[in-house]
Image (tube, helix red, strand yellow):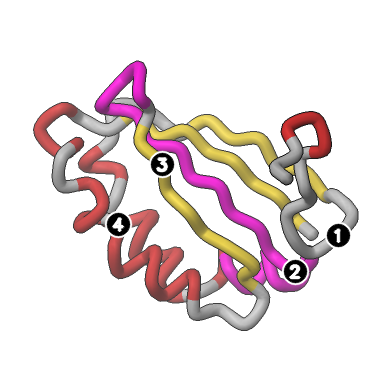
Amino acid sequence: MIFITAKFQVKPESAERWPEIARSFTEATRAEEGCLWFDWSRSLADPNEYVLVEAFRDGDAGGAHVRSEHFKAAQRDLPQHLVETPRIVNAEVPGADWSRLGELAVD
């Protein structure tokens, strides 16, 4: 799978509304055939920082995502709410789902 984590530094005036601002992009991406997950989290240390954790079945699915109309709309609409270009970690990893954290097993 293609595993991506991106940090978005959102302008303070947009931070509270970010989930709504990104809603259409989020919903459309989650509906993509090759999307495994697309989840936002808000930093506990910095209320203006959101982290996106996403995964796609393979490179073809990731390519379809960046060629989609909703991705183009996000490229056009989201930057006005950001302080800087998002930072990203992108890797191809084996598997198609989350693994269990053995070091913190729950009985």
First along the sequence among labels 3 and 1: 3
**Is the residue under label 1 in contact with that under label 3 (CB below 8 Å)?**
no
Q: Amino acid at mark 2?
A: Arg
Rendered view: 35 above or below 106: below
Type of the residue with mark 3: Ser
Residue at the image point whose x is 37% and y is 65% from the top = 25
Question: Is residue 39 shown left or right of residue 73?
Answer: right
Quadrant for the C terminus, please. top right
Looking at the picture, which amino acid does disc 1 mark? Answer: Gly
Per the image, the residue denoted by label 3 is 41
Chain-order first, disc 4 or disc 2: 4
The label shown at residue 95 is: 1
- The residue at which mark 2 appears reads as 57
Q: CA distance from mark 2 to mark 1?
A: 9 Å
Q: Position of residue 33 (x, y in %)?
A: 62, 82
Secondary structure at numbered mark 3: strand
The residue singled out by tag 4 in the image is: 22
Q: Residue at x 36, y 59 (%)?
A: 74
Residues under labels 3 and 2: Cα distance? 21 Å
Quick one: label 1, few (<14), some, or many (20+) residues within 10 Å? few
Residue 75 image label:
none
Q: Amino acid at mark 4?
A: Ala
Where is the N terminus found, in terms of image quarters? Answer: bottom right
3D distance between C-alphas at marks 4 and 3: 12 Å
The foreground one among 78 and 18 is 18
